[in-house]
Image (cartoon, grey):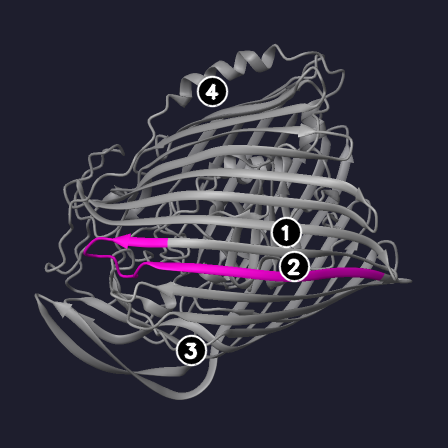
Amino acid sequence: MAFPQSLRAVRRPTPRTLRTPLFLALAMALPVAAMAQDSGQDPRHDDKMKDLDRVVVNASPLRRDAEDLIRPVEVLGGEALDNAKANSLGETVGRLPGVQASYFGPGVGRPIIRGLDGARVQVLSDGLSAGDVSTVSVDHAVSIEPFLADQIEVLKGPATLLYGSGAIGGAVNVVEGRVPHAVTAEPIEGRAEVRFGTGNDEKTAMARMDATAANGKLVFHIDGLHRETGDYDIPGYAEHAHEGDEDHEPGARGRLPNSFVRTDAGAFGMSYVGERGHLGMAASLFNTRYGIPGHAHAHDDHGGGEEHGEEGVSIRMDQRRTELRGGLRGLGVFDSLRVKLSNTDYTHTEFEGDEVGTVFENDTIEARAELVHQDWAGWDGAFGLQASRRDFIAIGDEAFVPGSDSRDTGLFWIGEREFGAVKLELGARYDRNTIDVNAADAIGPSRSFDATSVSAALRWNLSDNFHLSFGLDRAQRSPTAEELYSDGLHVATSSFEFGNPNLDVETANRVEAGLHWHTDTLSLGASIYYVGFNDYVYLADTGVSEDDTPARVWNQSDARFTGAEFDLKWSFLENASGTWALNAFGDIVRGRLTGSGTRSVAFSIEHEDHFHDYTADIALSGDLPRIAPARLGAELRWSNTNWRAGLGAVRYFDQDRVAEFEESSDGYTLVNADVAWHIDRANGNAFELFVNANNLLDEEARPHTSFLKDLAPLPGRNVSFGVRMFF
């Protein structure tokens, strides 16, 4: 990236990194799996062919399946998850209705739910915060590896009731099962996978295994992953030339420089499982290094690795996490108690070439308790207590956010009751959020906030196959330290970013109506929603630029989000050739500021040891920046006893409803295909050979949600292939 010359990187000690030969360990896991004991059943079909509508959603303390939950939810698991798995969590869930992804190169992608992202979408690991700093900056990766997930759950709409302030736009819960809570059906169970990619020289290997000791009480879990990718192929030039830009330099072509990824992840867990509950622990690590593409003018068509030039910007992230979880059933008037505790040690280091620029350190402790009750005056429900502490430090000349100590405490209740054909869900939550900021670095004082959220949802079962749902929420979110205290150059977005220490609590009022109809061969769901925000916090472009670097400020105004989505699954033919199905989806969202007039803001930019003072007027109305475009997608699928295949396309429409100083984005169509052949052995093992092809038309695609859309297009045509084993 191009940065002002006066801001130099400072060498800092390099944080610890991981160099684990996981390829060897994972390769050894394959023959071990083949020798697993005869189970007398087909584990592949047991794990992969289940109806996802009937899968239990772990994100809800009431442990209902997706079909029975009133609030909107999407679940990825089994074959659907195998086909969707990608380098980032955002890309993995990005083709679900109402869900898209941010993009900052292949190593970074956060989920965007109904147009909301960042600090409004909570990313969870088995119900606890991921503990990373992916909300601080768009170049920070989520520290969860999708390839190791059992299933991924997306709660659409406010999930503040369950998970607090950071889930006002929704939550994504990745179920990894690293702390076992039940004995395994067989003494040893697991899966392994090795895959290779053509468009980025990908080499990925993973394995996970769960086993129960001979005494039937101790259950063990182990998993590991290693991934290497080089710079990826693109269908044209890296940089996009705007009309009338006569000084544009074509730059790199055919391959995007500095888009490599290296990732290692692994965990070990064990639990004691008794008749009335379990108690277990797990230790895990996640280490990745990835390049930040953009402003690369080298004409080098050679792939990946560490050779990206002296000015290449790359990031090394290291996270160590320990967890303690337990559950107890049969507590008299209460049905069960579940307790979770995690401690996360996270380090994120930004490099310019070989020089250390900025180091972010984040230590998080989080605890959560859920006390479930049944039939209290006809209500089934759960009380919950959640508390966390986050100690955040940024070190370096380009540390645009001061250090802070954040403490959050929340208390909630959620309950449901049936009244004949109507099921009603009610809930309430209160949160206390405190941010103690380093006074020496901050532009404002420490702050405390109170946030209260209430929710009501109703489902009316008109028949066994058809129901209507309605939702009404009032959710609140406290501003984050980044929104309050940012002050300086934000390297990731190549902009100056200034916080507002006077920000108030953000309030969202949501109304939603939906329908769901299903038969043995057809499933149709649709919903429309409206969310009105009071004091919506957003990053506004000022129109001011210093040394070709724009200045942006955090601001507040009222806002409105409106949208709709649908999802269709139709098994239209079943004969001797196999089963044929058509899947389709679509979504649209519009986000607008609804205030009036302008607000004057003042800020100072340091450049070449001098401060330049600026004043700008920020419009309080108009379209919001980087709102996800409308989409339509369809897929034709076929399967028989040993084969499955699919061919699909997603059309991303033009996005010309843009904020002031924002460029519109052209639409594009991504065509994908997959084919897999599997064989189920008599001893219960299963093997699968697969080939997945992405962007078959090799189309240039620049997501409107990306800060790098003009510098880094999505990958071109890529074919990945490999083998999976289930045992």
User: Residue 453: x and y, percent?
Assistant: 62, 69
Q: Look at the numbered discs 1 and 2 and tell me whether their residues touch, using CB distance below 8 Å.
A: yes
Residue at figure coordinates x 61%, y 10% from the top left: 35
Label 2 element class: strand
Seen from the viewer's position, the closer of residues 243 and 65 is: 65
Q: Quadrant of residue 548?
A: bottom left
Q: Few, some or many C-alpha atoms within 10 Å of disc 4 (few <14, some 14-19, many ≥20)?
A: many
Q: Look at the numbered discs 4 and 3 and tell me whether their residues touch, using CB distance below 8 Å.
A: no
Quadrant of the rendering where the C terminus is positioned: top right
Where residue 556 is drawn, which disc sits there? 3
- Identify the residue position indicated by label 1 in the image: 584
- Identify the residue position indicated by label 4 in the image: 26
Seen from the viewer's position, the closer of residues 697 and 539 is: 539
Q: Residue furthest right?
A: 420
User: Residue 59: x and y, percent?
Assistant: 64, 49
User: Residue 605: x and y, percent?
Assistant: 18, 71
Seen from the viewer's position, the closer of residues 669 and 298 is: 298
32 within the magenta span: no
Left or right: residue 605 versus residue 573 is left
Q: Please provide the residue range marked out in magenta.
A: 392-417
Specify which label sits upstream in the sequence, 1 or 4. Answer: 4
Specify which label sits upstream in the sequence, 4 or 3. Answer: 4
Q: Is residue 697 visible?
A: no
